[in-house]
Amino acid sequence: MRAGDVDRGSRGSVARRALMLSLSLWLNGCRSPTDYVCPTILLPGVSVTVVDATTSAPPAARSTLVVTDGAYADSAVTAAGTGVVHSAAAAYGRGGNFAVVVHTPGYADWARAGVQVSVDDCGHPNTARFTIALQPLGP
């Protein structure tokens, strides 16, 4: 190498690194790896699917889901009819410490206290999901 010559190997390497960094920032929208966009969706805190414990089929009657957390209360009703999946969801957009009750005519009520529903970094609940096998009441 002569006096005044530039070491093109190291200069080229620096230029390549700068180009790769610029390209990476441009492709990622100038966000750091920890930045992200939260989707605008509304998710339930609690979701239930109801079946008859003896037949594994949906009950013929509608089921009512009731979810409470302190003074907060929400409810939902399943569809009715045979061959229809009986699902209901409540507490949309909420996390909390819920008491959950499912009432279906002809069946013993199902209840669970202390259902913890956390929220993610966007504030969406991590839905607590239950498949409930209802016990028919005697004749």
Image (spheres, grey):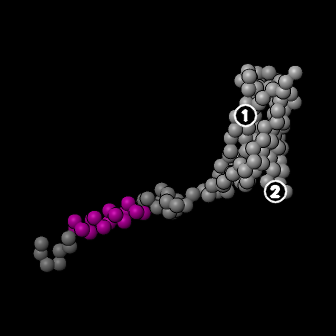
* Most foreground residue, 68 or 123: 68
Q: Which residues are magenta?
A: 8-22
Q: Amino acid at mark 2?
A: Gly
Q: Amino acid at mark 1?
A: Ile
* Most foreground residue, 92 or 66: 66
- Rendered view: 19 above or below 94: below
Q: CA distance from mark 1 to mark 2?
A: 24 Å
* Most foreground residue, 30 or 39: 39
Identify the residue at image location x=36%, y=65%. Answer: 18
In the rendered image, residue 76, in percent from the top left (x then y), is placed at 82, 40
Mark number displayed over residue 70: 2
Q: Is residue 7 left or right of residue 68?
A: left
Identify the residue at image location x=81%, y=26%. Answer: 136
Image quarter (top left, top right, bottom left or bottom right) of the N terminus: bottom left
Mark number displayed over residue 132: 1
In the rendered image, residue 94, in percent from the top left (x then y), is placed at 74, 53
